Image (spheres, rainbow, N blue to C red):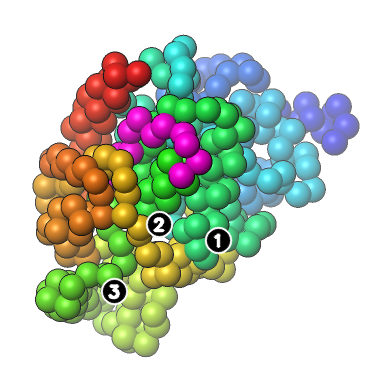
């Protein structure tokens, strides 16, 4: 892109940024998130970019190009560069860092509000699984995803202690990372698993039957609420059932992930489900901190201790207000307070 084209792109972006962020002026090097941008406004901004510039990119790219100048450079490329595995989410002046993972079929964007509410002087990095936009093949095994993350963690921080936080499916990935770190002689100072459960196939028969009954009841309720024109699609299309019931029985809406609907997103979700089904958690010789939502979602067991106490040398559980999704959105401050306390306690022991 030549200089005149770059200028034209910056001018077009400036108008979009100012309108979305409701600011009279935005400098080309101003950071979107530092100006008050959030996942919702990132989605809005990229929708505007598509209309004006004709480039359809996932709003997740905002983490890769958080300034107008960086976004203009990104838009100038015929193909977007690979998205980084390690994403800086929050700055901090002290070491070591805190590493956080997202849920099944999600992105680091879904934990934006939670990370913002965590109180710590240590930097926080998100770990992003590959294949969310179709440019790379997504992993279908937790072990492979864990190795991708571990390589990125070790590059950023070669030695422990390590502080690991995993949300939902991401907790399984963090558990596998913690296993590998301990097996290599590294210290895991904190393993925090938030609303994390293995696949239902690993549960006792009575628990599986109870969850199956809950799912049938949930699907029946969804079906009854659908307009007539969507009922047939719900009965005949697995994709439609997944899309309509993707809240796992939670009362709240799923967090914004910045993913674009389409075949790439479907493939990304399917790969995550394959990984979940295949993963067999091993006994963990360290301490597992588990955080449970007070409002139990119909897709998950009501007693995580019955699962994890047998798989960890030490198991501690905290219960926070909200459900599976709201704990990282509207109820995130309660969860963040517990995580902040656990982090402070773990750092004080180092």
Residue 188 shown in magenta:
yes
Labels 2, 1: front one: 1
Q: CB under 8 Å between callouts 2 and 3?
A: no
Between 104 and 329, which is closer to the camera in this rendering? 104
Which quadrant of the structure image shows residue 250?
Answer: bottom left
Observer able to see residue 101? no
Mark drawn on residue 158: none
Quadrant showing the C terminus: top left
Cα distance, mark 2 to mark 1? 12 Å
On screen, residue 149 versus residue 312, left or right, reads right
Circle 2 crowding by C-alpha within 10 Å: few under 14, some 14–19, many from 20: many
Mark 2 lies on residue: 104
Q: Which residue lies furthest to the right in this view?
A: 2
Lower position in the chain sequence, tag 3 or tag 1: 1
Instruction: State the residue at coordinates (26%, 55%).
Output: 311
The picture places residue 142, in percent across and down from the top left corner, at 47, 58
Query: Mark 3 = which residue?
Result: 201
Picture disc at residue 139: 1
- Work out whether mark 2 precedes mark 1 in sequence or the reverse, and give the earlier one: 2
Write the start and end of the magenta stretch as one range. Answer: 183-193
- Mark 2 or 3 closer to N-term? 2
> Which element is circle 3 on?
helix
Q: Distance between the residues labelled 3 and 1?
A: 20 Å
* Closer mark to the observer between disc 2 and disc 3: 3
| Quarter residue 63 falls in | top right
Please state if 16 lies on the left or on the right of 183 as rendered: right
Residue 105 lies in the magenta-colored region:
no
- Depth check: give the residue in front, 209 or 22: 209
Q: Which of 330 and 320 is in front in this view?
A: 320
Could you tell me which residue is drawn at 46 percent across and 44 percent down? Answer: 183
């Amino acid at each position: 892109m030549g200089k005149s084209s770059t200028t034209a792109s910056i001018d077009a972006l400036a108008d979009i940024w100012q309108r979305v962020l409701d600011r009279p002026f935005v400098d080309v090097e101003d950071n979107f998130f530092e100006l008050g941008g959030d996942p919702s406004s990132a989605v809005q901004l990229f929708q505007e970019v598509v209309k004006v510039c004709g480039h359809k990119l996932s709003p997740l790219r905002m983490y890769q190009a958080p300034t107008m100048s960086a976004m203009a450079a990104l838009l100038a490329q015929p193909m977007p560069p690979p998205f980084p595995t390690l994403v800086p989410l929050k700055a901090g002046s002290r070491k070591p860092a805190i590493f956080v993972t997202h849920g099944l079929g999600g992105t680091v964007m879904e934990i934006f509000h939670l990370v913002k509410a965590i109180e710590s002087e240590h930097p926080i990095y998100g770990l992003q699984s590959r294949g969310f936009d179709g440019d790379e093949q997504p992993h279908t095994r937790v072990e492979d995803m864990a190795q991708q993350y571990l390589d990125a963690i070790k590059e950023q921080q070669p030695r422990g202690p390590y502080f690991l936080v995993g949300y939902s499916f991401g907790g399984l990935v963090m558990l596998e990372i913690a296993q590998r770190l301990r097996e290599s002689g590294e210290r895991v100072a904190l393993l925090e698993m938030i609303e994390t459960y293995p696949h239902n196939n690993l549960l006792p028969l009575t628990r599986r039957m109870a969850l199956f009954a809950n799912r049938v009841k949930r699907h029946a309720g969804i079906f009854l609420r659908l307009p007539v024109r969507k009922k047939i699609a719900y009965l005949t299309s697995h994709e439609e059932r997944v899309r309509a019931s993707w809240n796992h029985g939670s009362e709240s809406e799923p967090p914004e992930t910045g993913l674009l609907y389409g075949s790439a997103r479907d493939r990304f979700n399917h790969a995550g489900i394959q990984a979940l089904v295949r993963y067999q958690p091993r006994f963990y010789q360290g301490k597992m901190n588990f955080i449970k939502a007070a409002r139990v979602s119909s897709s998950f067991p009501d007693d995580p201790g019955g699962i994890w106490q047998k798989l960890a040398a030490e198991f501690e559980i905290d219960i926070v207000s909200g459900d599976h999704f709201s704990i990282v959105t509207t109820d995130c401050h309660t969860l963040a307070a517990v995580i902040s306390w656990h982090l402070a306690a773990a750092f004080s022991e180092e």
